[in-house]
Amino acid sequence: MPTNVDHVSTVVRLCNKEHIPVIPFGTGTGLEGGVGATHGGVCIDLSGLNEVVEVHSEDFYCTVRPGVTRKALNSFIRDTGLWFPIDPGADASLCGMAATSASGTNAVRYGTMRENVLNLQVVLPNGDVLYTGGKGGRAKKSSAGYNLTNLFVGSEGTLGIITEATLRLYGIPEETVSAVCPFPTAQAAVDTTVEILQGGIPMAKIEFLDDLSVKASNRHFNLGLDEMPTLFMELHGSALGVQEQVEMVSEIAQSNGALKFEWESDHEKRAKLWRARHEWWYSGLAMEPGKKGFATDVCVPISKLPQVLLETKQDLESSPFVAPIIGHVGDGNFHSLILLEPDNDEELAAAKELAFRMAKRAMAVGGTCTGEHGIGRGKMKLLEKEAGAAGIATMKNIKLALDPNGIMNPGKIITI
């Protein structure tokens, strides 16, 4: 448990000299086995490095150390009128979110971690300390050389240890309104999403819950929602701008057969509406007490979302599993929670096959096998199919150049 970056550097340098694996640990909320010590070694727990180094409200950025979580940051800056909007659901560490290129419910408007990291301090496998945007760099754009920052965003600890991140901040919106809108079919809900985005309406969130997910939320939280395919939506902006957008979204939803459409601006009532989405994992697990969840994650071009989501729904319904679906459908990303008996190898193999088919279906239409969870251990074979031989070879060359002894989080993303 290091207390400063020099401590991290010293430990990594010694491990590199002795060829001992190093596994960085933030909060452990990743979903693809990224912190599993498959080769043994030293776990560097960064949770103690929890300082917000600086906040520059005039320039809309802050710098944090790896133990700072997104909720802690937003609490720290609440009096500045700014916030950091990337929300993967769990209260993850911000540097861990950078390492996995996390996103979440607000990505449709604010982007993912890739668009919101300005600079990183990284301890390289030889112990050197790198600033990917130059020491003190915080410009919102740059064309100076290779994009080192985005080389490490999404690298999952396989190229170095992120010990500091400089992040974009945003003004807290003047007005925020949310809605829950049930539809007769999943097709109608997804068609509504596509039409809203094609209309250029600046949605902050568009989340999809299938009928099974809504049923689970009602049972777990007693919410009283209609148990039908449902969109959860949110708009941010000025009072007048939001009102105009509400009218446009309502018209599109009604044209696709929305059964009702109620907007809510009160903070407590909005929080209650969103509980079904934010605690979806736990309500899903409660449907089959004693079972464990197997998470899936694919992302497709928006135009292909109706086709792929509906085919996936049919595939899951024909399986022996209870498997609710949710999605950040505003950016084409969706997930399923497949409920399994613990330690049942046959069920685990069948769930993996379902997830593999989901990923192949996504890649076949120009999508990806992971929109936000990363590769870790679970999707290495799928990455080979998605990136192709040249892509994997290039990744291996980068890995070997930076980590020739292969000590950084071995057994994740690629093998060398």
Image (cartoon, rainbow, N blue to C red):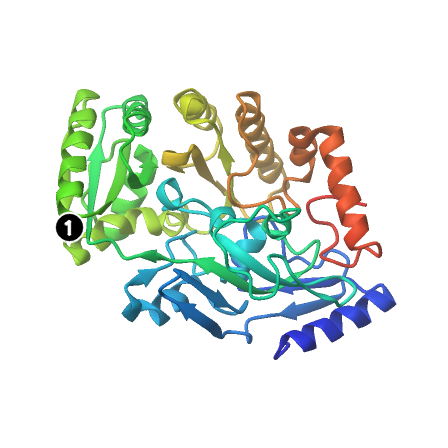
Between residue 161 and residue 327, name the one nearer to us. 161
Task: Give how far across and how far down residue 191 sits, in percent.
Answer: 31, 23
Q: Secondary structure at mark 1?
A: loop
Left of 86 or right of it: where is 228? Answer: left
Name the residue tied to disc 1: 265
Q: Quadrant of the C terminus?
A: top right
Q: Quadrant of the N terminus?
A: bottom right
Q: How many marks?
A: 1
User: At 49% from the left edge and 75% from the top edge, which residue is drawn?
Assistant: 51
User: At 23% from the left edge and 24% from the top edge, which residue is drawn?
Assistant: 184
Task: Give how far across and how far down residue 72 sits, in percent.
Answer: 40, 68
Extreme bottom residue here? 3
Task: Give how far across and how far down residue 260 sits, in percent.
Answer: 14, 32
Extreme right residue here? 18
Q: Quadrant of residue 126?
A: bottom right
Q: Amino acid at mark 1?
A: Ser
Task: Give how far across and how far down residue 159 sits, in percent.
Answer: 71, 54
Between residue 137 and residue 156, name the one nearer to us. 137
Residue 11 in the image: above or below residue 292: below
Camera sees residue 236? yes
Residue 136 in the image: above or below residue 290: below
Camera sees residue 314? no
Left of 117 or right of it: where is 246? Answer: left
User: At 63% from the left edge and 43% from the top edge, which residue is drawn?
Assistant: 378
